[in-house]
Amino acid sequence: ALLILHSTEDTIVPIDQSRQLLAALASKHKEFAFEELAGDVHAWSAIDGAKQKASDFLRDELAESQTLTPFVNFATADLTQSSSYRWVTILQQLQPRELSRVELVVKETPAAISGKTTNVSRIELDVSMLPEGKPFYVQLDRSRPALFREVPDDKKVQLVLRDDGRWVPNAKDTGLKSPQRGSGLKSVFANRPLLVYGTSGTSEQQAWAKSKAHYDAETFLYRGNGRLEVIPDTKFSDIDTADRNVILYGNADTNRVWPLLLSTSDVQVRGDGLVVNTRPEQGDDLAVIMVRPRPDSDVAQVAVIGGTGLTGMRLTNRLRYFTAGIDYPDLLVFGPGTLVDGTADVRIAGYFDGQWKLDDADIAWRDLAF
């Protein structure tokens, strides 16, 4: 469901843009509401009337979404933004950021849920609508049915797609990728993110890290009307950071928090190069973007914005990750040649697998051999 609120006198975003969106939605999407507000209230969240309208809309939509209807047809491309609809939650995708879809129906005799999926590798179903104390099965994509002896106490079951195409029951695992801890750099700028700049390395590297962290915070304030906290690495242990996302600026040699949060990472970045598992990528001028799970949390993430040297660090200044329509993957390594040759000097780019590992990662390498 979608709510659109727009002021008729907005001087920043013209009302015509929302009216064009309304016209496009009318023929394709039925679950939306649109209301034009009086006055110039671009920052509508500060207006009590608009806040109340949004609150009422969300309350009504939540109540409707909890209604256990027997059929679900749901599609999404970004699980960190939208992963659930009614009694279905897509937990993982086969191809990150590609469109995923589920079309499922509940059957009464025998008790079952069946249907098809597209670009889904892990799913959770709320089975509250099924009779308690009795067996039921789930059949997805015409694979062999997965049998469950009874509805569990929490009313939810998870299934995972195996390599052989079978959907099988899956134990709940908080260490995997999930909508709460998903793919891509933008996903880390949530969950009360903490921007931590390095205070080691050369004076130029220290100056870059501090300036870049503050620049990102100021950009986020301007573009997103939100506050990001910025601290030096020396203050990290002095505050409560439990379950918060953390963005580190620098590398393992320049940021003192690296050993605390990334010592077990499959990717290690230092001043003279980086190692991805056992594979080296040499150079002191490489820019690095990386997203990893935070090892001391079940929900938080750690991102790296930095490089192997000052040149690589400064290259990240050109990345516009707060701009709409732009996103970066779990791992991106590129050199200064990108300024002249474009993607020809992108060394590594792609996504870690569903377990945050490299085993089945969707990663492209410029140099196919060591």
Image: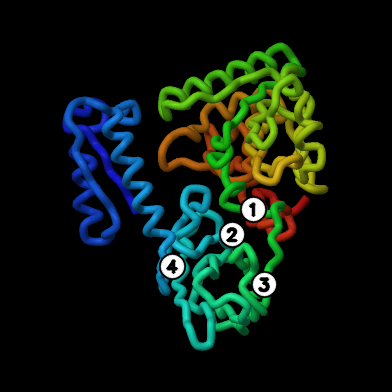
Label 3 or label 4, whichever lies nearer to me, is 4
First-in-chain label (1 vs 3):
3
Which badge, 2 or 3, is on the more N-terminal residue?
2
**Viewer-nearest of discs 2 and 3:** 3
- Cα–Cα span, label 4 and label 2: 23 Å
Drawn side of residue 304 relative to residue 130, left or right? right
- Where's residue 46, x and y in %? 33, 26
Residue closest to the eye, 68 or 368: 68
Q: Secondary structure at mark 1?
A: loop
User: Where, quadrant-wise, is the N terminus in this rendering?
Assistant: bottom left
Residue 61 location (% of width, % of height): 36, 53
Question: What residue sits right under mark 4 in the picture?
Answer: 68
Camera-nearest label, 4 or 2: 4
Disc 3 marks which residue?
Answer: 169
Q: Secondary structure at mark 4?
A: loop
Labelled disc at residue 177: 1
Residue at x 62%, y 67% (from the top left corner): 157
Residue found at the far bottom of this picture: 109
Whole-number angstrom distance, CA of label 3 to CA of label 4 = 22 Å
Q: What type is the residue that disc 3 sits on?
A: Pro
| Mark 4 or 2, nearer chain start | 4
- Which mark sits nearer the N-terminus, 3 or 4? 4
Q: CA distance from mark 2 to mark 1?
A: 7 Å
Mark 3 and mark 4 residues within 8 Å of each other at the beta carbon: no
Q: Determine contact: label 2, label 3, CB under 8 Å.
A: no
Name the one closer to the observer, 16 or 315: 16
User: Residue tagged by mark 2?
Assistant: 92
* Mark 3 residue element: strand
Is the residue marked by circle 2 packed among few (<14), some (14-19), or many (20+) residues within 10 Å? Answer: many
The kind of secondary structure element at disc 2 is strand
In this rendering, is residue 269 above or below 67? Answer: above
